[in-house]
Image (spheres, rainbow, N blue to C red):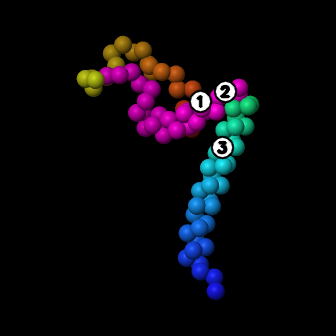
Amino acid sequence: MIDWWMVGTNSLWIVGLSILFAALSYHDWLAKETGQRRRELFRATLRAPAVCRGDVGEPEDPGGRGDASGSGPAVSLGPAMQAC
């Protein structure tokens, strides 16, 4: 008899590995197309959710009073902003 509980639980890690391999394959292709290193692309992808929240890319303001200089972002966000 088929144990459907085991089929369901084992399908979760199979789906997870499929997503992981798809991400690796996509970033490998994108690195070849853009001439960037895969490491840079992965970092930009992992940083993207923080960029969308606004946690990175802004000048440091320890006092919390806002940026009076008007200089804009302190770092170049590059492809990380495309995910937003």
Span highlighted in magenta in the image: 34-61
Q: Secondary structure at mark 3?
A: helix
Instruction: Name the residue: 57% across, 74% down.
Output: 6
Q: Nearer the viewer, residue 57 or 11?
A: 11
Q: Is residue 73 above or below residue 16?
A: above
The reply to whether residue 57 is visible in this rendering is yes
Q: Is residue 6 above or below residue 75?
A: below
Q: Nearer the viewer, residue 11 or 63?
A: 11
Which image quarter holds the N terminus? Answer: bottom right
Q: Rounded to the nearest whole Å, what is the CA distance between mark 2 and mark 1? A: 7 Å
Is 35 included in the stretch rendered in magenta? yes
Q: Quadrant of residue 24?
A: top right
- Res 36 label: 2
Label 3, on which residue?
24
The reply to whether residue 82 is visible in this rendering is no
Q: Earlier in the sequence, mark 1 or mark 3?
A: 3
Q: Is residue 29 above or below residue 75?
A: below
Label 1, on which residue?
40
Q: Is residue 65 above or below residue 25?
A: above
Q: Rounded to the nearest whole Å, what is the CA distance between mark 1 and mark 3? A: 13 Å
Q: Give, as a three-letter code, the residue at label 2.
A: Gln
In x, y percent, where is residue 73? 45, 21
Position of 43 compared to 29: left or right?
Answer: left
The reply to whether the C-beta atoms of the residues labelled 2 and 1 are less than 8 Å apart is yes
